[in-house]
Image (tube, grey):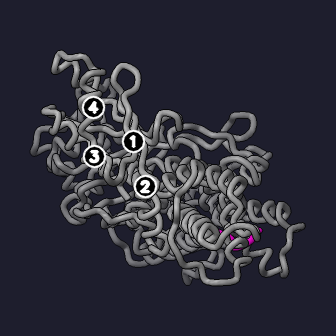
């Protein structure tokens, strides 16, 4: 239900009836219950244009508002604000209509766009570490959200699989196992360290590694076979992490650096033809207005850089994938890089002007001391180890609850542990740094995944106790039911806002507010008590059912599983 859109139409009709034209009508949530459910704050702007008293304009508009359906009351407040209350009967009808709707009232977009979401982006030379967490889960949430809303989403995992270090790695792989068997690559970190030791200690090995770099670039069959063996093993490690993390990336989504290798010369040719790049100290550079440092697209020795590959990728996504919107879910520290390549791609005609290019920037995960997350010895924390620890800690948190089997405990611990890690990250404004805190994220209180899962489990327990099929209408009768019904119907507006702004925390904030209202409803409005009449009981059960459905759908968009009991 697009509530704000419907209210905008009603206010527009009221303005027209009062002979007032407005370029834009923005409806906002009321800040306090006494100010209504929503507010229209555009009167002050209209008063300046019309040179009239804003309160008098607001009074004239209020007199024209249709009160026969969606709206029960409007009033003028302050110097010219219009407060709006929704009608309980309308809320009852709307919530009843979506109780059994698998989409919980969320419509799909009328005109789907093709949206490329570039995220995760691990380097194939090492195992995924905590530095890959935010890109992986923010990107996956955005992709899942856009898909749910009906957009045509193309996931892209731009992996680092090209460069000088791969000559060293495949030379060492050949030494270890000449048939290309990847059994030796179970520990990528150790494999990389061992190869680096050989490279530093043996001049003969180092020369061989450099030769292999050239051979890879020239398409040598033997070297490419070894290289592919290494990439396959590396991707296997990534897939293990994605499975644990409940991230929807597959091999089909991989579009590696090597894919664009044969397009890089064309990028340079285009920049030269368009007179965008110039040669400076032997390197090909693009000087952008306002930037002190040029963007280097080709080194003096003929080598290409990340900017060159990203320009090739942008051109491919525009010309071949036909994208309308391209989202790069990448660390905020890359802001300048993406600003440059976005500008160059538009100037060079590699990307059409109407295509939206977005850097979905995010901050850093920090330890309790406010420093980047590291192991005790200062090393990089492997992502798979972090996720395994989350499951262990979740097991400890719930082991004393009423759980009937080890299998059930294991399943619940996985849902709760992985959910806790993901939710803690997604609940923070993505551009902010945040402190990683196990105790906080595995708390049954506050804005945590476990609090949401607990609320869902409580609702399922209520429904099981009723021991009959729940059918009937929702009847919104008091203030707490009004607030709960309103929150449930705000779900679509919430998802739309999150998709436009690429802000997963918009969804987590909504879920926390929804569950908080439901807990108040559960406290004040008994559901199964013997003295409650059947009509009221059914209405409250239906409100609980719809709340559970919205919680489940919201968490699923975040890539988090619910549990039936805790």
- Give the crowd class for mark 1: few <14, some 14-19, many >=20 residues within 10 Å: some
The residue nearer to you, when weighing 11 against 199, is: 11
Horizontal side, residue 214 vs residue 530: left or right:
left
Q: Where on the picture, by quarter, is residue 293?
A: top left
Residue 66 numbered tag = 3
Q: Position of residue 382 (x, y in %)?
A: 67, 57
CA distance for labels 2 and 1 = 27 Å
Horizontal side, residue 328 vs residue 312: left or right:
right
| Vertical placement of residue 468 versus 250, above or below | below
- Give the crowd class for mark 4: few <14, some 14-19, many >=20 residues within 10 Å: few
Dot 1 lies on which element? strand
CA distance for labels 4 and 3 = 71 Å
Q: Which residues are magenta?
A: 559-566
Say which label, 1 or 3, has the lower sequence index: 3
**Nearer the camera: disc 1 or disc 4:** 1
Can you identify the residue that label 2 sits on? 495
């Amino acid at each position: 239900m697009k509530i704000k859109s419907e209210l905008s139409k009603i206010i527009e009709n009221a303005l027209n009836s009062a002979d007032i034209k407005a370029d834009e009508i923005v409806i906002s949530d009321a800040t306090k219950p006494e100010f209504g459910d929503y507010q229209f704050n555009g009167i002050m702007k209209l008063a300046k244009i019309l040179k009239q008293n804003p309160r008098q304009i607001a009074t004239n508009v209020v007199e024209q508002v249709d009160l026969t359906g969606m709206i029960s009351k409007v009033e003028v407040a302050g110097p010219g604000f219009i407060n709006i209350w929704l009608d309980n009967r309308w809320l009852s009808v709307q919530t009843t209509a979506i109780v059994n709707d698998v989409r919980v009232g969320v419509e799909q977009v009328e005109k789907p766009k093709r949206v490329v979401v570039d995220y995760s982006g691990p380097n194939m030379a090492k195992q995924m570490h905590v530095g890959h967490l935010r890109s992986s889960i923010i990107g996956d949430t955005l992709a899942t959200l856009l898909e749910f809303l009906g957009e045509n989403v193309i996931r892209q995992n731009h992996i680092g699989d090209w460069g000088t270090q791969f000559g060293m790695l495949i030379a060492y792989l050949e030494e270890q196992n000449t048939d290309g068997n990847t059994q030796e690559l179970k520990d990528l970190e150790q494999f990389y360290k061992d190869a680096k030791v050989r490279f530093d200690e043996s001049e003969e090995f180092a020369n061989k590694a450099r030769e292999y770099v050239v051979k890879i670039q020239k398409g040598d069959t033997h070297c490419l076979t070894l290289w592919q063996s290494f990439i396959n093993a590396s991707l296997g490690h990534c897939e293990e992490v994605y499975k644990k993390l409940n991230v929807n990336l597959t091999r089909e989504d991989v579009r590696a650096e090597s894919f664009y290798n044969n397009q890089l010369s064309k990028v340079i040719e285009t920049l030269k033809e368009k007179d965008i790049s110039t040669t400076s100290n032997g390197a090909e550079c693009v000087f952008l207005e306002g930037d002190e440092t040029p963007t280097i697209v080709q080194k003096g020795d003929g080598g290409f850089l990340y900017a060159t590959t990203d320009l090739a990728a942008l051109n491919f996504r525009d010309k071949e994938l036909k994208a309308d919107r391209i989202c790069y879910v990448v660390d905020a520290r890359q802001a300048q890089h993406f600003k440059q390549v976005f500008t160059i791609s538009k100037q060079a005609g590699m990307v059409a002007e109407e295509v939206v290019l977005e850097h979905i920037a995010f901050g850093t995960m920090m330890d309790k001391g406010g420093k980047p997350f590291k192991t005790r010895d200062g090393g990089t924390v492997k992502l798979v180890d972090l996720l395994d620890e989350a499951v262990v800690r979740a097991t400890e948190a719930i082991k004393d609850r009423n759980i009937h089997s080890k299998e059930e405990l294991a399943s619940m611990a996985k849902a709760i542990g992985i959910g806790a890690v993901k939710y803690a990250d997604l609940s923070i404004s993505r551009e902010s740094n945040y402190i990683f805190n196990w105790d906080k994220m595995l708390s049954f209180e506050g804005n945590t995944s476990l609090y949401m899962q607990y609320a869902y489990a409580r609702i399922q327990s209520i429904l099981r106790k009723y021991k009959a099929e729940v059918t009937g209408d929702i009847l919104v009768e008091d203030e707490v039911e009004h607030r709960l019904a309103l929150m449930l119907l705000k779900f679509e507006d919430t998802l739309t806002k999150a998709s436009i702004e690429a802000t997963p925390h918009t969804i987590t904030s909504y879920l926390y507010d929804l569950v908080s209202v439901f807990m108040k409803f559960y406290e004040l409005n008994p559901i199964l008590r013997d003295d409650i009449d059947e009509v009221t009981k059914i209405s409250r059960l239906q409100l609980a059912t719809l709340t559970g459905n919205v919680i489940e759908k919201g968490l699923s968009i975040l890539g988090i599983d619910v549990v039936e009991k805790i």
